[in-house]
Image: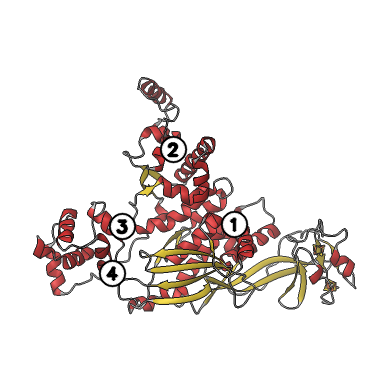
């Protein structure tokens, strides 16, 4: 049973350094308080509770759970609630935010490395290696956080929980609501977080358990720092950022109520958080208008948060894919995705390499993957299989049975028809299924309605300079991929060079040339200019 400190406490500070679990804290600089979630009665450390032994005034007493409802108490004013429409909110969706989401979801599965001075880091190249993001694990309690050494950093990573990615997305939504998020803080209460995550509906968790969980999850996204070396074709100047937390937890306010014994019971928490300096470059509305910074945002569906909170334990792989899809879908809904990529995200490269050599483990992972795909399908993220690389015979059984009619007679006919085919839906998987899957693809995921962008506001039609208007007239009907290939080859440009000149990725050029999608009118105009289409055609 945990202990609680009563109002007899004279703040002598004897007990705090003796507590083996760190359960005793000095709250708001004046009151000593035992966190019941951390106090274990000194079990496993000492025969007697150390705080009881050392206290000169017998202040600590066995903790009794608070009975009755919590009285409304005065609290700090919080930032406006997110999800006012009950469904979606804008959120900062820059690649830095995506990568921290991956870190919180995938943790040790990512390729972390140790630098020459023993610090753990994870690096990600962007724009074909022109830009670099480097992430370190830090200790938030330090006002000037220094990257942790590898052993401590790995231990901290092991305490991370995929649900912290939901908190990170909530911060990104709050930051998107601020004009200058690198200068302003946002304030959230435990009640707001409970409702965003759907914890308010959980009857199996007590109030102290919910508060302990929220407090833990809130801190995790603040334990990662990022440094940036950014260079990108276009008008925005190159910039560098020294390591700094993505989210700075400025303050945690504890709200208590006292019982008849004089024990304080935690009844609420308020958090003040400020976004890091990265927002000055990636979430800068006025800078974007002056073409001095980016302003990158997307739509965050609340259903994603509540779904991750409910499936994280049984289907962590599905939760990881869901979080990844939130950002991937920003690149356009019809994005081909290889099964290898999905598996890397869901289970990590190390696990994939390990199971590749063991057929039993491969089969187990395959079952997990198919079950995770089914969970995604259940929550409205419907995978659309590529008929060429992911044909019916290697698709999961649940997908094959999608056409099974509800009506009993029709269902009987369905099974009779199936029985007359050479291969049946329930046949065992064909030999080499794993290897075929490693080359299989999904055409895209159909996403739920609340994942789609809200209807765009009507904006003024952009008028291009006269010469561009002329070019756009000339390229009607749409520029064909063959025209682009021929023009590029005639000018002896590689796909990479063309990508750099137009300010896109090499894969964008490759996809346009393969006819996977049609570039926008504006991009067609740029292509015509760069490739001198009027001269070559
Ligand atoms: S009983 Fe032990 S673990 Fe609990 S608060 Fe006291 S010293 Fe800490
Ligand atoms: S030892 Fe007793 S009086 Fe001293 S801080 Fe701890 S609870 Fe308070």
The residue that mark 1 highlights is: 161
Q: Residue at x 53, y 64 (%)?
A: 168
- Estimate the x, y position of residue 137 in percent, counting from the top left: 57, 66
Front: mark 3 or 1: 3
- Residue 491 in the image: state x and y as whole percent: 16, 63
User: Given contact means CB atoms under 8 Å apart, are the residues at marks 3 and 1 in contact?
Assistant: no
Of callouts 2 and 1, which one flags the residue occurring earlier in the amino acid sequence?
A: 1
Quick one: quadrant of the N terminus? bottom right
Q: Do the residues labelled 2 and 1 touch (CB within 8 Å)?
A: no
**Measured from the top left, where is residue 13 in percent x and y?**
81, 75
Q: Is residue 52 left or right of residue 344?
A: right
With respect to residue 280, does 417 lie above or below?
above
Residue pictured at 50% horizontal, 65% vertical: 82
Mark 1 crowdedness (10 Å alpha carbons): few <14, some 14-19, many ≥20 = some
The residue tagged 2 is 434
Looking at the picture, tell me which residue is in the foreground, 533 or 354.
354
Separation (CA) of disc 3 from disc 4:
30 Å
Q: Residue at x 69, y 57 (%)?
A: 209
Q: Name the residue under label 4.
A: 459
- Residue 507: mark in rendering: 3
Q: Is mark 1 on a helix, strand or loop?
A: loop
Q: Please state the total of marks drawn on the protein image.
A: 4
Mark 1 → mark 4, Cα distance in angstroms: 41 Å
Residue 250's image quarter? Answer: bottom right
Dot 3: few (<14), some (14–19), or many (≥20) neighbours within 10 Å?
few
Q: How crowded is mark 2: few (under 14 residues within 10 Å), some or many (20 or more)?
A: some
């Amino acid at each position: 049973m945990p202990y609680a400190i009563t109002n007899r406490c004279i703040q002598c500070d004897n007990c705090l350094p003796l507590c083996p679990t760190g359960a005793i804290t000095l709250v708001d600089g004046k009151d000593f308080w035992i966190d019941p979630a951390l106090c274990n009665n000194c079990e496993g450390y000492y025969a007697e509770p150390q705080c009881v032994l050392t206290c000169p005034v017998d202040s600590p007493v066995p903790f009794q759970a608070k009975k009755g409802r919590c009285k409304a108490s005065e609290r700090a004013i919080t930032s406006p609630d997110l999800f006012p429409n009950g469904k979606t909110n804008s959120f900062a969706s820059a690649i830095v935010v995506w990568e921290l989401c991956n870190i919180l979801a995938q943790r040790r599965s990512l390729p972390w490395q140790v630098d020459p001075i023993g610090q753990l880091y994870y690096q990600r190249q962007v724009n074909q290696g022109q830009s670099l993001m480097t992430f370190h694990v830090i200790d938030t309690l330090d006002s000037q956080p220094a990257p942790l050494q590898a052993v401590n950093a790995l231990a901290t990573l092991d305490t991370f929980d995929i649900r912290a990615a939901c908190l990170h997305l909530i911060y990104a939504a709050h930051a998107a609501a601020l004009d200058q998020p690198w200068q302003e803080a946002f304030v959230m209460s435990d009640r707001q977080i409970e409702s965003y995550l759907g914890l308010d509906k959980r009857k199996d968790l007590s109030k102290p358990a919910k508060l302990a969980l929220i407090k833990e999850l809130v801190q995790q996204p603040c334990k990662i720092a990022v440094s940036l070396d950014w260079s990108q074709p276009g008008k925005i100047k190159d910039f560098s950022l020294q390591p700094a937390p993505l989210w700075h937890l400025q303050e945690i306010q504890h709200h208590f109520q006292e019982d008849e014994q004089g024990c304080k019971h935690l009844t609420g928490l308020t958090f003040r958080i400020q976004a890091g300096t990265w927002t000055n470059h990636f979430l800068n509305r006025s800078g974007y208008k002056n073409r001095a910074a980016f302003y990158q945002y997307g739509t965050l569906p609340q259903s994603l948060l509540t779904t991750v909170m409910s499936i994280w334990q049984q289907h962590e792989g599905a939760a990881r894919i869901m979080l990844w899809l939130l950002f991937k879908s920003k690149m356009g809904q019809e994005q081909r995705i290889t099964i290898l990529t999905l598996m890397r995200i869901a289970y990590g490269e190390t696990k994939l390499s390990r199971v590749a050599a063991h057929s039993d483990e491969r089969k187990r992972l395959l079952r997990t993957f198919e079950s995770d795909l089914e969970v995604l399908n259940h929550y409205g993220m419907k995978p659309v299989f590529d008929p060429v690389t992911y044909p019916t015979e290697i698709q999961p059984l649940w997908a094959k049975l999608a056409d099974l009619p509800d009506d009993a007679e029709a269902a009987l006919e369905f099974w009779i028809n199936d029985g007359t085919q050479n291969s049946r839906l329930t046949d065992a998987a064909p030999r080499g299924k794993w290897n075929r899957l490693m080359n299989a693809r999904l055409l895209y995921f159909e996403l739920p309605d609340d994942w789609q962008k809200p209807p765009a506001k009507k904006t003024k039609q952009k008028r291009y300079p006269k010469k561009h208007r002329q070019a756009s007239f000339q390229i009607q009907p749409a520029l064909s991929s063959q025209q682009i290939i021929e023009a590029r080859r005639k000018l002896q440009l590689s796909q990479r060079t063309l990508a750099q000149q137009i300010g896109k990725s090499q894969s964008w050029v490759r996809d346009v040339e393969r006819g996977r999608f049609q570039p926008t009118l504006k991009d067609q105009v740029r292509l015509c200019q760069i490739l001198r289409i009027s001269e070559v055609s």
